[in-house]
Amino acid sequence: MSDVLDLACELIARASVTPDDAGCQALVAARLERAGFACEHLRHGQVHNLWATHGAGAPVLVLLGHTDVVPPGPRADWTSDPFAPEVRDGVLYGRGAADMKSGVAAFVVAAERFAAAYPRHGGTLALLLTSDEEGDAIEGVRKVADTFRERGQRIDWCITGEPSSTARLGDLLRVGRRGSLSGTLTVRGVQGHVAYPHKARNPIHQAAPALAELAGRVWDEGYESFPPTSLQISNIHAGTGAGNVIPGELQVLFNLRYNPNWNAEGLEAEIAALLDRHGLEYGLRWHRSGEPFYTPEGRLRAVARDVLGRFAGAPPEESTGGGTSDARFIAPLGAQCIEVGPVNASIHQVDEHVRVDDLRALPDLYFQLIAELLA
């Protein structure tokens, strides 16, 4: 059986820039099949998805991850080739080292060890991988979750291997995530000469009060361990480039990160009502990235708190912060979801890296979580 470092390096060496899997899942499937797992490849468009299972019946524990990575950016900015994994001073460098090929490698090694140690374990141990987490996330776990609904596939617990630790392995347990909703607002005016404003209608001037109200609104005071819902305007564009022309159209991009006080439908209706009150002529296009999810106290959280506490030497911080993950598609199936993974200090950065000592400890952490739940 290959060491987890060897497997992580094999995965990093495959330039699986989203949505390309570059053979990562075939490599994983071959290993898991030798360990007694049944593997199913669920391809949608350009996206590869792997569903591997060992055992049968309930409870069903899913290890959730992704094999795709973000682009490396200018390779000249890297100290070494981003797709030629290199260990320097006890640190593994390469694109995906932290997000999340180390987590995938550790999942595989832990699953192999568990299947060998407990060949007749209770319930089902499953691994779900996609190559569409860093991209549009349309044909990946979102689509697989639809398939699971049609099949009636039960999932009780889900452990996502995203890099969640902050300073040391196991110091943070993510027990939920905020929802994410993006909007593209187009405000229509009438183009004209700046010297004759009465002959034009400036969409910037018209939209400014509404945008100020959106930016200044307090949406809620938070929800349990979730921070308050927030709206951020990320881009505003208008005009022809000429200083003497009133633009005929304004485009605004914005995003909401929201807690369980809201759902996407409610936020969309609230914002449309606000724009209507301001009398704007507008169009609004939405993209729902995912609803918020939260795992309350129960067996999964209790086991994870105990295991992580042993690894980190202190009880983990239990958090709902950060962006989004594919667990947002698994939670609506009725699963309790947590996120446990390596330190996230360098994700998406040049010279992305993970400590080798952390990488070598990660399969043991996952093995203990699996054993506590299924052995």
Image (spheres, helix red, strand yellow):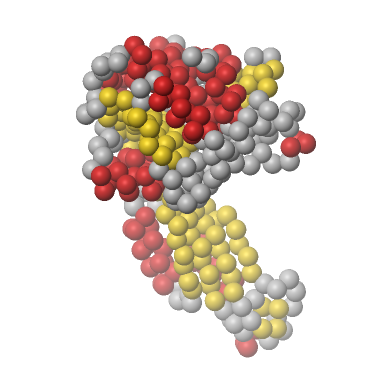
- Position in image of residue 99 (x %, y %): 54, 32
Q: Is residue 23 left or right of residue 221?
A: right
Q: Is residue 296 visible?
A: no
Number of numbered discs on residues: 0
Give me the residue at 68% from left, 28% from top. Answer: 84
Q: Is residue 180 left or right of residue 69?
A: left
Q: Nearer the viewer, residue 271 or 31?
A: 31
Q: Which quadrant of the rendered structure holds the C terminus?
A: top left
Give me the residue at 34% from left, 11% from top. Answer: 117
Give me the residue at 52% from left, 16% from top. Answer: 2
Q: Is residue 360 above or below residue 95?
A: above
- Position in image of residue 293 (x %, y %): 34, 41
Q: Nearer the viewer, residue 316 or 19?
A: 19
- Position in image of residue 178 (x %, y %): 41, 43
- Position in image of residue 140 (x %, y %): 44, 45
Q: Nearer the viewer, residue 165 or 130?
A: 130
Give me the residue at 53% from left, 72% from top. Answer: 187
